[in-house]
Image (cartoon, rainbow, N blue to C red):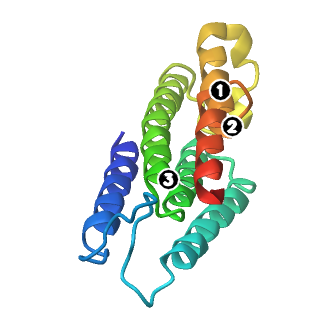
Amino acid sequence: FNSITGVTTLSIVLIRFLLTVLHDGNSFITGTDIYSMIPGINWSALISVVSAGSIIVGSTVILWQKNLKKIFAFLLLHQAGNLLIGLTSASTEGTDAVIYNLIVLLIQMTGILFCLSVFEQRYRAMTIDDLKQKGKNSPILFFSFLFFISSIAGLPLSAGFSGRMLLVYASVS
């Protein structure tokens, strides 16, 4: 649970930092609800590069992992990059999308971590291969794990999907 708390706290501190310290004191919110940061620095491009790096590293490293806890850690790194997408818009819509996604991410990660801890305590499942045949042994636990994983993957009709749509809408508009 410390990793979930860390990502949540870091995201809130980053939003607070961007919206209070790095803004132009004379015109923080312009008439079109777009934040005005310190002139001369392209904050949108800087945040986009960090976001893309986080998403790429988190996604590619997951492909070679077998340990469930390491997969969980790199999934958090990937999701942190997704949260940064909303900040590239420098608008109130982007901030709202980040806050919504932060709440959804907190619920998803708590559910995944709970399921992983039960798998580890009950079945000593530490790797992907250890999860085989667990759907027959404990179907409710397995389907709840599947529910949280599909939501964090952003499958349609899930909170993860609607959150990503909000982030994309905020960053495009």
Q: Quadrant of the N terminus?
A: top left
Residue 113 picture location, percent across and down: 48, 33
Which kind of residue does numbered mark 3 sit on? Gly
Taking 151 as reference, is 71 above or below it? below
Q: Residue at x 51, y 53 (%)?
A: 83
Residues under labels 3 and 1: Cα distance?
Answer: 20 Å
Q: Secondary structure at mark 2?
A: loop
Label 3: how many residues lie within 10 Å, few (<14), some (14-19) or many (20+)?
A: many
Q: Quadrant of the C terminus?
A: bottom right
Q: Which residue is mark 2?
A: 154
Q: Secondary structure at mark 1?
A: loop
Asked if the residue under mark 2 is in contact with the one under mark 1, i.e. CB atoms within 8 Å, the reply is yes
Precedes in sequence: disc 3 or disc 1 = 3
| Viewer-side residue, 16 vs 126 | 16
Residue 69 picture location, percent across and down: 54, 44
Taking 16 as reference, is 156 above or below it? above
Q: Which residue is mark 3?
A: 94
Which kind of residue does numbered mark 2 sit on? Gly
Asked if the residue under mark 3 is in contact with the one under mark 2, i.e. CB atoms within 8 Å, the reply is no
Residue 3 picture location, percent across and down: 39, 48
